[in-house]
Amino acid sequence: MCPTDIGPPDFHDMLPPVIKNNYGQWKYHEIPHPGVLLHVAESGDKLYSVRVGSPRLVSIHQIRDLCDIADKYCDGYLRFTSRHNVEFLVSDPTRLDPLLEELHTKNYVIGGTGRGITSIVHTQGWVHCHTPATDASGPVKAVMDALIDYFTGNKTLPAHLRISLACCLNMCGAVHCSDIAILGIHRTPPKIDNERLPKICEVPTTVASCPTGAIRRDAESGGVKVVEERCMYCGNCYTMCPAMPLADPENDGISIWVGGKVSNARTAPMFSKLAIPYLPNNPPRWPEVVDAIVNIVEIYASHAKKHERVGEWIDRIGWERFFSLTGIEFTDKHIDDFRLSVDTFRTSTHFKF
Ligand code: SF4
Ligand code: SF4
């Protein structure tokens, strides 16, 4: 077949020989040190995966450095995990300690395995996207600085704890199945510039872009108007029409959701549920968000049973107990009063009325 540049290359071509030779024949794995996974094959072959954190937005210089390290210690084999950690795949055990030493010398942070916190997956934030209600890299850096001991293995947790951030509720980062989700929220409708709108946007497309039918044609200006009680501040209209910006420096902020997981170990996957409806954007270090998350992590660490994920722990103790243990206030914002919702109208994590 003629080679093309359409679609991803076949991953088999990029596997290290030790994985190719033992494909589907791995016997067990263990974690000899935090950040180091050891996989042992039926044949007796061993593969060490050394995991280091990355900030996700990495420079070309750092990528070159990572590749040089991989060339030196693991025949060029490394991979990026789905949580943007870097894993060096070492098949020669004599090269493991020199690799760890060089990583330490170069200040790479080794960890993110087992019962702890691995890197926070996040979306683009103010650096790139047009609808964020908060930044992405900024809060993630501040939160991870406070929780770094759970990454390096200096502190452990009852089970894996996955934190994710999406900077608006369109959630291209899909944070809704995370133990702790940081989600940017808008709280005000778009500001319409009807002077500019008819010149740069198609009015019918703009009207059709609203999932709740909140946008109507405004005959007077030739632009549009928004029926505010139908608006759920999603930003879809701004994606279609730049004359309807949604960003609001005073009212945008962050909500915190807890108890989700993707894993189907022991219990089925779970969705995250609302814990804190609003925290202000307070760059550059987002202290309110950091404090709130550290509080949830510490209460979970001291109350959950071994292997219990955050959602499983809350299911066992009940949401009332979760709110009282963490000191998080239960407010009217926890109850869904958006009148166009069907399944969740007047429902909270506690009750429906
Ligand atoms: Fe853009 Fe929303 Fe994705 Fe953030 S979560 S990058 S604002 S679409
Ligand atoms: Fe409609 Fe969303 Fe725009 Fe509100 S923000 S008017 S719900 S598209």
Image: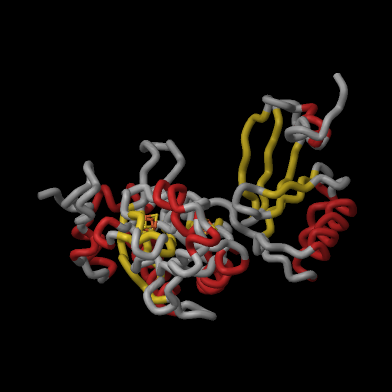
- As drawn, the residue found furthest toward the top would be 1
Q: Is 164 situated left or right of 267 in this image?
A: right
Q: Residue at x 46, y 48 (%)?
A: 205
Q: Residue at x 77, y 30 (%)?
A: 10
Number of numbered markers:
0
Q: Is 334 situated left or right of 13 in this image?
A: left
Mark yes or no: residue 63 visible. Answer: yes
Q: Quadrant of residue 324?
A: bottom left
Q: Where's the N terminus, which quadrant?
A: top right
Choose between 106 and 58: the one closer to the eye.
58
Q: Residue at x 19, y 49 (%)?
A: 345
Locate residue 160, reporting x and y percent. 48, 51
Q: Is 234 situated left or right of 126 in this image?
A: left
Locate residue 349, reporting x and y percent. 22, 52
Choose between 171 and 111: the one closer to the eye.
171
Q: Residue at x 72, y 26 (%)?
A: 23
Choose between 231 and 321: the one closer to the eye.
231
- As drawn, the residue found furthest toward the front would be 220
Q: Quadrant of residue 9?
A: top right
Mark yes or no: residue 177 visible. Answer: no
Is 191 drawn above or below residue 13 in the view shown?
Answer: below
Locate residue 77, reporting x and y percent. 81, 45
Q: Is 238 situated left or right of 93 in this image?
A: left
Locate residue 248, reporting x and y percent. 42, 74
Choose between 129 and 180: the one closer to the eye.
129
Is 206 drawn above or below residue 12 in the view shown?
Answer: below
| Structure colour scheme | secondary structure
Q: Quadrant of residue 258?
A: bottom left
